[in-house]
Amino acid sequence: MMSCDAPGSTPLVGEISSLVSQGARRYCAPDGLRPKSLRSVISAKESRIVAAGASDAGLAGAPAARFSEEVGEPGASVRHCNLCGARTAVRVPESDHLPRHVCTACDHVQYLNPRIVVGCIPEAPDGRVLLCRRRVAPQNGLWTFPSGFMELGETTAQGASREALEETCADVAVGTLLAIINVHRVAQVYFVYRAKLLGSHHAPTSESIETRLIHEDEIPWPELAFPSVWHGLKHYFADRSCGAELVHTMDLVVPH
Ligand SMILES: [Zn+2]
């Protein structure tokens, strides 16, 4: 049970970071659409959560409702070498101990690693937090705090700020780290930050049906998009109730 007393980028990277920032701003223009090239294309499939919680086992009581997590389809992206285009084969390369996708022509190794998801919980001066309803699959129509895949050329905090802008049109000041959540079944790691809402503007985007400032006792818990959102918000309000700003770590277990 959690308690209150618990304890120089390269030019290329800089260029990419600038493009991502410009894309996020353009995304909030009245008729703006974020260029697809600025966001990694992912596919998704549904999973069901059966258990959650490791170091913060006291918050393992996420509702047994149906959840899904975004997951890439790595097989589709590595059938061909991204250097020469030849077919790949799965084998253990020299000086490695795990099977990898290796090019059959040039021996280039294409590594698959977990994706980082960055997000934040923006709080208004009156204590309400900014949530949005997803316009995109999976979990279309369900609620989340702004979050999404980290982009090249940005830090986790910068990514959290960018996602807030992209999904809610809100400017935020990202604060302390709230939680690191492993969803290893789908190869994702969440970095969730506390944040302050700057100004009062927020609005739907092409990724969000609705944005809303919500009091703690009005959070639509059964309508949250992902278990990571549920746990992030639970940690946030538990800490806030006692003036703490802890960093929580947990593993969410999603079955095959
Ligand atoms: Zn190749």
Image: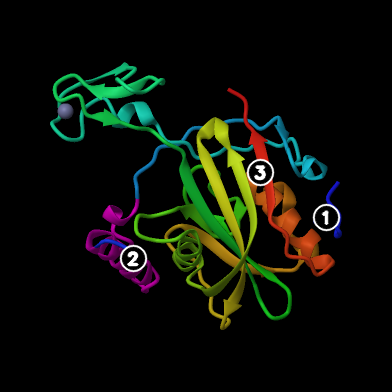
Per the image, the residue denoted by label 2 is 8
Determine if the magenta segment contains residue 30.
Answer: yes
Residue 111 lies, in percent from the top left, at 34, 32
Q: Indicate whether 16 appears above or below 256.
A: below
Measured Cα–Cα span from mark 2 to mark 3: 35 Å
Main SS type for the magenta part? Answer: helix
Q: Amino acid at mark 3?
A: Pro
Q: To which quarter of the image does residue 162 belong?
A: bottom left
Residue at 74% over, 35% down: 64
Q: Residue furthest bottom?
A: 199
Per the image, the residue denoted by label 1 is 6
Tell whether 194 sits left or right of 164: right
Residue 181 lies, in percent from the top left, at 62, 45
> Which dot, 2 or 3, sits closer to the camera?
2
Per the image, the residue denoted by label 3 is 227
In this view, the residue in front, 103 or 204, is 103
